[in-house]
Amino acid sequence: MKGALKLGKIGGIGLFIHWTFSILLVFIVYVNYKAGNDTKQIVWSVFFILSVFITVLLHELGHALAAKNFDIQTKDITLLPIGGLARLERLPEKPSEELVVAIAGPMVNIALAFLTSFFIHIPDNSEELIAQLTGGINGNNFLLNFFLVNLWLALFNLIPAFPMDGGRVLRALLSYKLERIVATKIAARIGQFLAMGFILLGIFSNPFLVIIGIFVIMAAQMESNFTESKYRLKGYKVKDIVMKQYLTIESGETLARAVELLLDGQSKEFLVTENDRAVGTLNRDEIIEALTKKTDEVLIDSIMNRNLIFLQADSFLEDVFELIYTNKSSLMLVIENDKIIGTLDTENLLEFILINEVKSKRAKVD
């Protein structure tokens, strides 16, 4: 993810923190300062925020470890001011697997809350709770706040709405009886209905709920569209949509030559070769970026994308859909019998889906 600083690796999983996290820390310090809190209070507040993000990291690692049990690797985990994001190489589709992976995160929070409960006195009533929490984060109420945050994270993530874990739990349960696409649409609509409730409640109470509601509505629609697109590819293979006509450019050519080819036709992506061997790809965005930083005489070899993605011609599109989707800006190479027979990009895939959708609707009318 752009703008993220790599912290290291855990079990081969890259750990990143987004630069906007620093803004959150500055905000926390500023709020405490404006409230008249002393340095000790500010340090406790910052320490608490850091502990919460460690909790979020453990939450995401829960998903990652659960996915690993089903031979699903996690590419990386990024910590954001609004939470964490674990990028799995693919989403589990078997109901039992999706259920385990989805619920693993909230279960980590529940486990942390349970362990913390042994070291705190849980208030008997709301008045006592408010009294303990009054005055901000300090040494006396740190663990109580940690306990409450973990309970809140578990409950919030179990709301049956995408992109929260609860939306995936709901879909997994529905998938035991229904097709995945049907289960996804039902789960998405339920989530959007709840989101409307967030928006209405937020209008009269907390504007932040309005933002959450809008975010849930958009995320639910994206999940529904993604699943439907994948469903429409069922039964088709990569070779069914391979593009056999594609432009190549030698790695020893100049940026000026790439610009010339870009302006001379409709192609926005090129296969970079060296002695008739594929060595990289180059797209329009990379050409434009190079133009802003380098001279026209710079060689393609220094600006091309060397990360080649190969697809087997006989692979089913539904099996490689997520790989294609996560490499939207890349030109992928289709191989058969260890030879390149063509290319494939996201635009071509989406056109194929659109054409099939139109054909399907026309067939129903006929």
Image: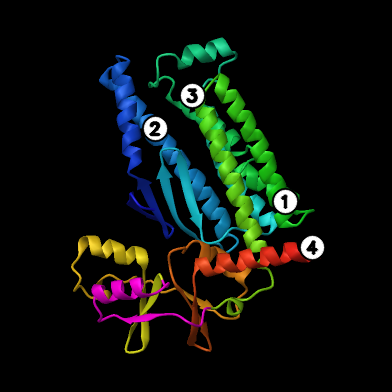
In the image, 99: left or right of 23? right
Q: Report, in whole angstroms, how far the alpha carbon at label 2 lies from the one at label 1.
A: 37 Å
Mark whose residue sits in front, 2 or 1: 1
Q: Which mark is residue 49?
A: 2
Q: Whole-Å distance between the Cαs marked 2 and 3? A: 14 Å
Residue at point 53%, 54% (across, down):
65
What is the x, y in percent for residue 335?
A: 51, 83
The amino acid pointed to by label 4 is: Lys
96 vs 295, nearest the viewer: 295
Q: Are marks 3 and 4 in contact (CB under 8 Å)?
A: no
Mark 4 or mark 1, which is nearer the start of the sequence? 1
Labels 3 and 1: the sequence-earlier one: 3
Callout 4: few (<14), some (14-19), or many (20+) C-alpha neighbours within 10 Å?
Answer: few
Say what secondary structure mark 3 lies in.
helix
- The residue wearing badge 4 is 364
Give the answer, above or below, for where 348 lies relative to 96.
below
* Residue 4 rendering spot, x and y as whole percentages: 34, 49
Image coords of residue 361 (percent x, y)? 73, 62
Is 246 one of the magenta-colored residues? yes
Instruction: State the residue in front, 164 or 359.
Output: 359
Look at label 3 and name its amino acid: Leu
**Quadrant in the picture for residue 248:** bottom left
| Residue annotated with mark 3 | 144
Q: Nearer the viewer, mark 3 or mark 1?
A: 1
In the image, residue 163 lies at what x, y percent? 57, 45
- Given residues 56 and 24, the one toward you in this image is 24
Q: Nearer the viewer, mark 2 or mark 3?
A: 2
Is there CB contact under 8 Å for labels 1 and 4?
Answer: no
Count of marks overlaid on the render = 4
Q: Tag 2: residue type?
A: Ile
Residue assigned mark 1:
183
Q: Earlier in the sequence, mark 2 or mark 3?
A: 2
